[in-house]
Image (cartoon, rainbow, N blue to C red):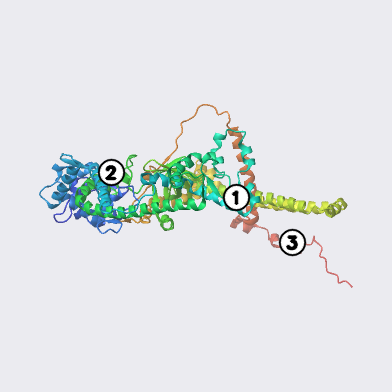
């Protein structure tokens, strides 16, 4: 960063330093003194006026503690309030630059009210932990709160005894799990028994089918546990009772044995089977126990949360100090200035950067989470960036999210909606990403140079492909129509008319189809020929200029290239100069106060392209390449043919005639007088009179 000299504002205010970051002049916040004087910094000079509490790669609890009005936004006033509180607690504000979550008591001001509160909270925590030291860290606070939470639960349980008795004593939780493991399978068994009672002839269909067992009998049955587990729990019968001492599906025997030992042998000791009513009684006992636990746990959690909230206020000063010592300086680099964004360090990214997207042999580093897709898309075009919206799914985490990635280098010719990619979040977890929308804006001047040729080539390819598809579809429809109409009567008529009308009609149809297809292709090549013909006409008109100097042909070719690619490059240059990250952040709830420019040089660092070494070895499966002179000859023939077609069409639609040469005055005076006599008045040609016919 190129620093500007120290700037002293009017009056006796603080002297701020400035630098150029991303093409915009911004204030520098790099010392503890700068942080202490944030209240004197003109709000118009702040890069951000507010940012959301959630959705950032930043500790949300730190921002929540700073959010004084609890509106879900961190505003300038709240940032200034945090800096002023720190000046009353810390002796040296430069301590914030280290970003540590440990505070030495020697760094705390003991003669201020704020400093005293911090020291009292810190010593209370250390006393409860049984530690004697002159410093405290975040791990100490977390350990203290975890222990205090368990203490609150114990006190609540002792103060709120419940007369409800667990149905299976100390093993009630295990019994609950055993019942739930077989709940669905037992319900399926009793339903099959009811259907057998309804229609005994349906029993074979409701029982395990021999054909299914025969299908897997030739393989290792131990490897087919999943298939066997889909069979009924037991063989359904008209008695509609569940056997307890045998006849259970082998795939479920382990779970059933656990259920029998914990529940069924307790409730139905000595019995060989249980009915559906008896099983429902077991379910009622277990469900009542589950509901009691849920209600009791909910009430206890609410009570404990209230106790933690009350107690948390007592230790909040020390937790607040620890969090601000660790996070505040980094927040300023993403709030007052965007230093983390422009730093371009692989280990440091801005708080709004969600991770990296790998797609089409490139890595996009500017990826932002999208909370409201329609709102974001409505604002995206104003950024001037080429954007890839992606839907990301992580099956490991069981989560989904939407992101937008800025494409700042390369081309988009191989990118399309529905293309798959891989997204890595800031924690290194991979997500399956799918492109859902592309906002096409210029990426670079180089890409803009080739854009007209790429679009023209795509247009020609699409026209030819469409024509070929229409022809193929027409031939297929005709073939299927003839096959469907192929009756005996039609075949007889075809045979009878084989030598006369049908061939003529068929030939006529083929000729029309051929003429139709030829007309389409002729139209395409005529368009190309007209363009080349127009260029040829211009070259003919500039013939004298081209032949005057040897380098004029080079100038002419350069002029043609500029004529074709110039507008696209100019438009790209204008848009690239205006690329701004602000609209993307505004759509996510930020209030951006300054332009966040992404020029071409900086943008190239946000998207890295794949780089391969030069391979010297020969590829055994490489396509056979045509000799360079054959390629040149082929292109010359094609261009000559297109030039001729275009020239003919140009002469037809826009005929060009040379201007008449003016006759000198002397030659006009010496011209013989006979030249002015009309040819029809000469004596050599007889005059033929019209003779009236009778």
Answer whether labels 1 and 2 touch (C-beta < 8 Å): no
Single out the mark in the foreground, 3 or 1.
1
Q: Give the farthest residue toward the left.
A: 111
Question: Label 1: which residue?
Answer: 238
Query: CA gap, disc 3 to disc 2?
Result: 91 Å
Question: Label 2: which residue?
Answer: 1
Residue situated in front as seen by the camera: 357 or 644 = 357
**N-term mark: 3 or 2:** 2
**Residue 553 locus on image (x, y percent):** 52, 43
Mark seen at residue 679? 3
Query: CA gap, disc 1 to disc 2?
Result: 87 Å
**N-term mark: 3 or 1:** 1
Helix, strand or loop at mark 1: loop
Helix, strand or loop at mark 3: helix
- Image quadrant in which the C terminus is located: bottom right
- Image quadrant in which the N terminus is located: top left
Q: Is residue 59 left or right of residue 5?
A: right
Residue at left offset 71%, top offset 50%: 476
Q: Residues within 10 Å of mark 3 (few under 14, many from 20)?
A: few
**Residue 683 locus on image (x, y percent):** 79, 62
Q: Give the farthest residue toward the right.
A: 694
């Amino acid at each position: 960063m190129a620093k500007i000299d120290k700037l002293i504002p009017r009056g006796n205010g603080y002297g701020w330093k400035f630098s150029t970051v991303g093409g915009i002049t911004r204030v520098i916040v790099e010392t503890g003194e700068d942080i202490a004087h944030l209240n004197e910094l003109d709000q118009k000079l702040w890069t951000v006026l507010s940012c959301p509490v959630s959705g950032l790669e930043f500790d949300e609890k730190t921002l929540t503690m700073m959010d004084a009005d609890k509106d879900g936004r961190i505003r300038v006033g709240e940032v200034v309030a945090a800096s002023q509180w720190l000046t009353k607690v810390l002796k040296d504000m430069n301590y914030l630059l280290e970003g540590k979550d440990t505070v030495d008591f020697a760094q705390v001001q003991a003669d201020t009210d704020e400093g005293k509160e911090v020291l009292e909270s810190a010593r209370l925590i250390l006393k409860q932990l049984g530690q004697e030291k002159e410093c405290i860290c975040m791990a100490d606070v977390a350990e203290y709160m975890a222990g205090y939470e368990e203490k609150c639960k114990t006190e609540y349980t002792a103060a709120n005894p419940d007369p409800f008795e667990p149905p299976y004593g100390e093993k009630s939780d295990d019994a609950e799990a055993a019942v739930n493991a077989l709940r669905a399978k037992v319900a399926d068994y009793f339903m099959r028994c009811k259907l057998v009672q309804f229609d005994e002839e349906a029993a074979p269909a409701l029982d395990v089918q021999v054909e299914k067992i025969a299908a897997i009998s030739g393989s290792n049955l131990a490897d087919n546990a999943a298939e066997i587990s889909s069979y009924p729990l037991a063989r359904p019968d008209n008695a509609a009772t569940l056997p307890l001492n045998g006849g259970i599906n082998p795939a479920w025997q382990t779970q059933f044995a656990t259920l029998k030992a914990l529940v069924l042998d307790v409730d139905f000791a000595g019995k060989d089977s249980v009915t559906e009513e008896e099983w429902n009684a077991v379910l009622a006992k277990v469900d009542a126990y589950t509901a009691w636990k849920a209600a009791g746990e909910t009430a206890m959690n609410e009570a404990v949360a209230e106790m933690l909230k009350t107690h948390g206020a007592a230790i909040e000063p020390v937790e607040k100090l620890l969090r601000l010592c660790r996070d505040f300086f980094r927040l300023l680099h993403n709030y007052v200035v965007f230093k983390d964004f422009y730093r371009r360090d692989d280990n440091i990214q801005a708080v709004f950067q969600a991770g990296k997207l790998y797609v089409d042999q490139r890595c996009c580093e500017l990826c932002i989470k999208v909370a409201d897709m329609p709102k974001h898309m409505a604002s995206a075009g104003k950024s001037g960036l080429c954007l890839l919206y992606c839907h990301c799914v992580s099956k490991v985490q069981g989560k989904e999210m939407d992101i937008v990635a800025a494409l700042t280098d390369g081309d988009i010719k191989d990118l399309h909606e529905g293309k798959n990619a891989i997204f890595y979040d800031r924690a290194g977890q991979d997500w399956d990403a799918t492109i859902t929308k592309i906002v096409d804006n210029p990426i670079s001047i180089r890409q803009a140079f080739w854009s007209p040729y790429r679009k023209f080539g795509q247009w020609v390819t699409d026209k030819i492909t469409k024509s070929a598809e229409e022809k193929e579809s027409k031939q297929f429809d005709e073939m299927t129509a003839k096959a469907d109409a192929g009756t005996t009567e039609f075949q007889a008529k075809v045979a009878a008319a084989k030598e006369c009308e049908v061939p003529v009609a068929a030939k006529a149809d083929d000729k029309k189809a051929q003429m139709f297809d030829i007309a389409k292709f002729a139209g395409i090549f005529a368009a190309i020929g007209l363009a080349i013909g127009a260029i040829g006409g211009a070259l003919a008109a500039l013939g004298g200029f081209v032949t005057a100097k040897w380098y004029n042909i080079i100038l002419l070719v350069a002029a043609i290239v500029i004529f074709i690619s110039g507008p696209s490059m100019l438009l790209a240059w204008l848009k690239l100069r205006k690329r701004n990250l602000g609209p993307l952040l505004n759509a996510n709830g930020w209030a951006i106060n300054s332009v966040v420019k992404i020029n071409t040089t900086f943008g190239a660092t946000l998207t890295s392209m794949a780089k391969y070494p030069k391979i010297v070895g020969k590829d055994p499966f490489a396509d056979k390449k045509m000799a360079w002179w054959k390629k040149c000859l082929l292109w010359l023939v094609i261009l000559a043919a297109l030039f001729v077609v275009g020239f003919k069409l140009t002469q037809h639609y826009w005929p060009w005639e040379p201007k008449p040469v003016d006759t000198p005055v002397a030659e006009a005076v010496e011209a013989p007088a006979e030249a002015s006599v009309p040819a029809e008045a000469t004596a050599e040609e007889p005059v033929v009179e019209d003779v009236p016919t009778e």
